[in-house]
Amino acid sequence: MNDEELHILLCKHPVKTFLPSTYHREVWSRIESCEQRRAKSQVAYLARRLLLSLSNPAAAFVIIASFGAVGAGAGVLMYQKTHDSIGELAYLETVNPLVRTHSEEEP
């Protein structure tokens, strides 16, 4: 039987199935839960690959060095933001007469 004969046969067959009213909702909830499990399994897979790659000394050195570089870069950026805001506050204290430091307050 070829595809066209099968198509004709399927079109002639009466279908008498009734879907429950919650069918579409249940299908989409299953799809969403499957996608959530897939995302979790991908994170677990990446973590497993990372830990397995640490058994190779060269790969471990590269991974640890890259994490260290990213951490140091983030630390430098945070320090610069903090340092800049302290500088802005010091400038504001010198210009604005209403802002006084604790040492300038009168007893």
Image: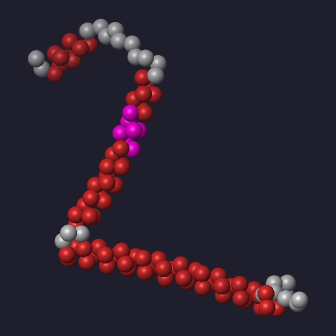
Instruction: Please tell me whether residue 69 is drawn above or below residue 34 in the rendered image.
Output: below
Q: Is residue 30 left or right of residue 57?
A: right
Question: Please, which residue is most extreme toward the right here?
Answer: 107
Question: Please, which residue is most extreme toward the left here?
Answer: 1
Instruction: Please tell me whether residue 101 is drawn above or below residue 40 in the rendered image.
Output: below
Q: What x and y, as percent, mark residue 93?
A: 77, 88
- Point 72% across, 89% down: residue: 91
Report the predominant secondary structure element of the magenta stretch: helix
Q: Nearer the viewer, residue 77 or 3?
A: 77
Quarter-of-image position of residue 32: top left
Residue 33 falls within the magenta-colored stretch: yes
Q: Is residue 96 visible?
A: no
Q: What x and y, as percent, mark residue 106?
A: 88, 90
Q: What x and y, as percent, mark residue 2?
A: 12, 20
- Point 66% across, 87% down: residue: 87
Quarter of the image with the N terminus in it: top left
Quarter of the image with the C terminus in it: bottom right
- Point 58% across, 80% down: residue: 81
Instruction: Please tell me whether residue 93 is drawn above or below residue 59 in the rendered image.
Output: below
Q: Is residue 10 visible?
A: yes
Q: Which residues are magenta?
A: 30-36
Residue 47 falls within the magenta-colored stretch: no
Q: What x and y, as percent, mark residue 45?
A: 28, 55
| Total marks placed | 0
Quarter-of-image position of residue 85: bottom right
Q: Is residue 57 left or right of residue 73?
A: left
